[in-house]
């Protein structure tokens, strides 16, 4: 619930920052429960939404849908609509939409927390994972998945994996905690979450992967008095990396839940 509230506040803040004279307007009849992720598909001019919801207005969607500018549309295969549990993330990779979350079935197909949607049908992506996928990113034409998982089939997969087209491979030595967010910045994959270590490297909830090594970003992010620390969201703005989540320090500087990294500080 805390995460849903934070996402809602961030979306509202962003809307009014973009245009202070704008007014909010409904998108169709909305959803029956929380929206946990949004992804604009510029290839097909539509907006994907995923979350805990079952319905959009009176129409059954089962946790995932896309808005075509007029209506919410179901993601249906052979009469089976959507997924059997929450959606947390989307990304577009090699002509298909990839979907991650808590679900284990998509369109009637077993898929273990991650699935591929080609616009008409659902497909599993390898063996999937033993726990939720919270973040997906297409970086340098490679698909990355991060989340709460620790296994892919019978193979170790500590919270961060890449897809080689046939199987999931753990990235480096993985993380010691949940990966919540990823994005590409300055040629590297930037990673945020509820981890303190990337392999044997101390990174304190945020780091970058250059294809061969995991690199810390300064002293990372922290919270006083052993409180919960989490990087929920990463994006690039004005050529800087922005991180949002639950933290009150970046290194020894006060940073209340929102910080910006310029490459050195």
Image: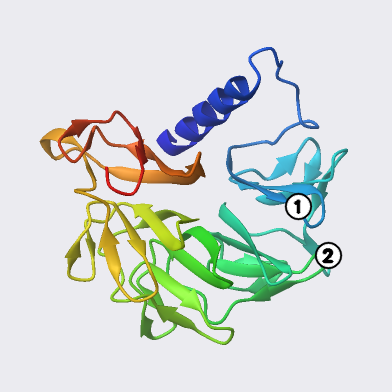
Q: Quadrant of the C terminus?
A: top left
Q: Is residue 77 left or right of residue 169?
A: right
| Residue under the image location 38 percent in, 69 percent down | 210
Q: Nearer the viewer, residue 67 or 101?
A: 67
Determine whether label 2 and label 1 are within 8 Å by CB.
no
From what the image shows, is residue 178 above or below residue 258?
A: below
Q: Which residue is mark 1?
A: 42
- Is residue 61 visible in the rendered image? The answer is no
Using the numbered discs, state the Cα–Cα distance from disc 2 to disc 1 in whole angstroms.
27 Å
| Res 119 → quadrant | bottom right
From what the image shows, is residue 23 above or below residue 175?
A: above
| Residue under the image location 80 percent in, 61 percent down | 76
- Disc 2 crowd rating (10 Å Cα; few below 14, some 14-19, many 20+) is few
Give whichever of discs 2 and 1 has the lower sequence position: 1
Kindly report which numbered mark, 2 or 1, lies closer to the viewer in this rendering: 1
Q: Nearer the viewer, residue 115 or 106?
A: 115
Q: Secondary structure at mark 1?
A: loop
- Residue extending farthest to the top is 21
- Is residue 34 visible in the rendered image? The answer is yes
Q: Nearer the viewer, residue 260 or 100?
A: 260
Image location (x, y in percent) of residue 237: 50, 40
From what the image shows, is residue 148 above or below residue 233?
A: below
Q: Quadrant of the N terminus?
A: top left
From what the image shows, is residue 147 above or below residue 33?
A: below
- Mark on residue 176? none
Image location (x, y in percent) of residue 216: 25, 57
- Mark on residue 79? 2
Image location (x, y in percent) of residue 10: 51, 30
């Amino acid at each position: 619930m805390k995460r849903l509230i934070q996402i809602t506040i961030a979306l509202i803040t962003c809307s009014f920052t973009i245009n202070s004279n704008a007014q909010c307007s409904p998108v169709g009849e909305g959803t029956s429960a929380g929206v946990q992720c949004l992804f604009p598909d510029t290839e097909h001019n539509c907006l994907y939404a995923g979350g805990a919801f079952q319905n959009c207005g009176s129409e059954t969607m089962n946790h995932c849908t896309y808005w075509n500018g007029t209506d919410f549309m179901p993601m249906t295969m052979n009469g089976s609509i959507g997924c059997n549990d929450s959606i947390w993330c989307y990304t577009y990779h090699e002509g298909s939409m990839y979907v991650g979350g808590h679900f284990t079935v998509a369109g009637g197909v077993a898929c273990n927390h991650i699935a591929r949607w080609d616009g008409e049908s659902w497909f599993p992506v390898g063996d999937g994972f033993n726990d939720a996928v919270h973040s997906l990113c297409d970086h340098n034409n490679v698909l990355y998945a991060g989340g709460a998982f620790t296994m892919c089939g019978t193979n170790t997969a500590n919270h961060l994996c890449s897809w080689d087209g046939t199987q999931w491979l753990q990235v480096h030595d993985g993380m010691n905690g949940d990966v919540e967010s990823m994005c590409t910045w300055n040629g590297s994959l930037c990673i945020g979450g509820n981890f303190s270590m990337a392999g044997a490297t101390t990174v304190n909830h945020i780091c970058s992967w250059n294809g061969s090594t995991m690199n810390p970003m300064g002293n990372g992010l922290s919270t006083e008095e052993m409180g919960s620390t989490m990087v929920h969201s990463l994006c690039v703005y004005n050529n800087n990396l922005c991180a949002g989540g639950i933290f009150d320090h970046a290194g020894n500087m006060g940073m209340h839940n929102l910080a910006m990294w310029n490459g050195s500080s």
